[in-house]
Image: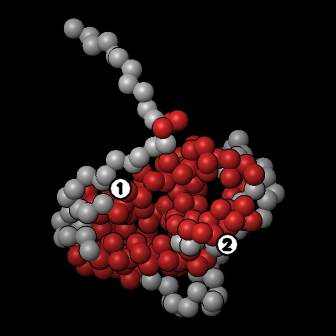
Amino acid sequence: MSTAPTLAPTAPLRRALLDAAALVRTTAAGDVARARLLAEHVRTLVGAPDATGPADLRAARLEAALRDWEPAADPAARDAVADALVPVQPDDTAAADPLVAGLHLGRLADADVPPAERLRMLLRLGWALDGVPAAERAAWLRDHAPASARALWWAVGRRRFAAHRAQVLATPGTRPAAVALPRAVAPVAVPVPVAA
């Protein structure tokens, strides 16, 4: 296991949580597909708070609200989810929001991290980078992420995040726009035999 320090980019991830609260509030009553998509997005943003940390009560409240909201997209449960996402202290310079306590970027390349968790970590990194001004993103990534995390971000993470972001931010009832890939990595059509 890696011993790299935990990065706590609270301001960008707190912004992403506030944006998620706004997305949740705009979800129509009964739109179960959108509720499930946004519930998974919220779980990705929150990550896995420390089991004994200060986020226990708030994370438990959020998870209970998500479980109530997902099956039927009920407006009352939707509002409970959105309320749980808004930090108690709205000032980003105040104490760190325990729901976004940190990214474990040093663990991205560890062999014991399951692929699904690695993808969630990359998506969280993407949302953190999304909250950093575009001109500062490369420097932020270089300053805060170990080389292994940067390599995974450039090789896999940025494309997966672009597709995830397009899906999350798509207008309900429409399909997200196709994500443009650089010409060097554009998919190639391969003929597949059809069984008769």
Counting from the top left corner in percent of width and height, residue 171 is at 26, 63
- Dot 2: what SS? loop
| Colour setup of the view | secondary structure
The residue to which callout 1 is attached is 167
Which residue is at a point 52% across and 35% down the rendered structure image? Answer: 184
Q: Is residue 191 visible?
A: yes
The residue to which callout 2 is attached is 8
Counting from the top left corner in percent of width and height, residue 76 is at 25, 79
- Dot 1: what SS? helix
Counting from the top left corner in percent of width and height, residue 136 is at 63, 70
Mark 1 residue type: Gln
Mark 2 residue type: Ala
Which residue is at a point 50% across and 85% down the rendered structure image? Answer: 87
Q: Nearer the viewer, residue 175 or 35?
A: 175
Q: Is residue 68 left or right of residue 56?
A: left
Q: Is residue 54 left or right of residue 57?
A: right
Mark 2 or 1: in front is 1
Q: Which mark is residue 156?
A: none
Residue 7 lies in quadrant: bottom right
Q: Nearer the viewer, residue 97 or 152?
A: 152
